[in-house]
Image (cartoon, rainbow, N blue to C red):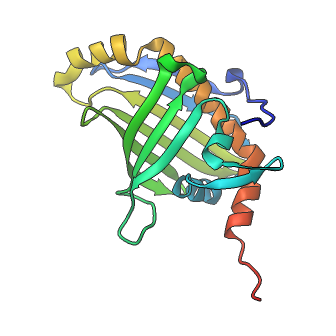
Amino acid sequence: MSISWDPKPVESARSGVEVLADGRLRCWIEHDLLRGVTPPMLDWWFRHLEGDMDFEGQRLSRYRVWHPRDHIEVSYTRRLADGSVGVGAQLHIVEMFGGNPRHRVDALSDIVRLDEQGFEHRPQWHGLTAAAMDYRFKAVPGGTHYTNSLTVGIASPWAWPLNLLIRRFVFDAGRAHAWIRHNIEEVGQFERFLPALFIRETSPTDAV
């Protein structure tokens, strides 16, 4: 896929990495103002990750337009009874942070919150809930204030030794910083495509 790509730099956001008392690794980001993007657009987006879109004169996977280098594929492996996506649905995410095979992710993740204030999902590792992805959206003049975090490990005091192994062999500081860069780049990309896609997909069509 070939499209123009000028991602926001890491320095455009505030971010950090910390080790929690139970040994989990927490990465957090406070993004630059997301200009022209509203919380309803973000709520809609996370319910409609699948499918293609027109972008720069091409018909492309909308997930790959979101991050043309790192994203590989996404699907909803479980939907709600009416076929929609919301709390109780499940994602299958395949991506590589920085385009680096060492930072490949291939995970199932359960959606536990999705509304105009935020999105939360819980990636699994060998059948265990081993991470927490938490996003928050707030409408502000000019766009959206967007924050998010990724907490990796098992949320239990007894899991400290296992969390140490996870930090050492599964998700170390290098991978944490690669995720931060990846996320700043994909969130910044919303400004380039989401407002037009949202209007095109949600505007009522004229009756024939």
Task: Please state the horizontal and vertical placement of residue 33, each as a whole percent of the image.
Answer: 71, 40
The residue under the point 37% across, 41% down is: 108
- Residue 21 spot, x, y in % from top left: 30, 20
Give whichever of 104, 33 is nearer the camera: 104
Residue shown at 70%/21% (left/top)?
11
Quadrant the C terminus occupies: bottom right
Residue most extreme to the left: 158
At x 74% / y 55%, what residue is drawn?
195
Classify 177 as above or below 43. above
Q: Nearer the viewer, residue 206 or 161?
A: 206
Instruction: Using the rendered view, name the quadrant where residue 14 is placed.
Output: top right
Q: In the figure, is residue 154 to the left or right of 151?
A: left
Name the residue: 42% across, 47% down.
Answer: 91
How many marks the image carries: the answer is: 0
Q: Can residue 56 be seen by looking at this rendering?
A: yes
- Looking at the image, the residue that sits furthest to the bottom is 208
Q: Is residue 52 above or below residue 26?
A: below
> Along the line of sight, which residue is nearer the eye, 53 or 132?
53
- Relative to 22, is 100 on the left or the right? right
Q: Nearer the viewer, residue 61 or 161?
A: 61
- The location of residue 188, given as percent across then percent down, is 70, 37
Rendered image quadrant of residue 69 = top right
Residue 156 image point, x, y percent: 21, 29
Query: On the rendered image, what quadrant is the N terminus found in?
Result: top right
Residue 38 visible in this rendered orientation of the protein: no
Left or right relative to 84: residue 53: right
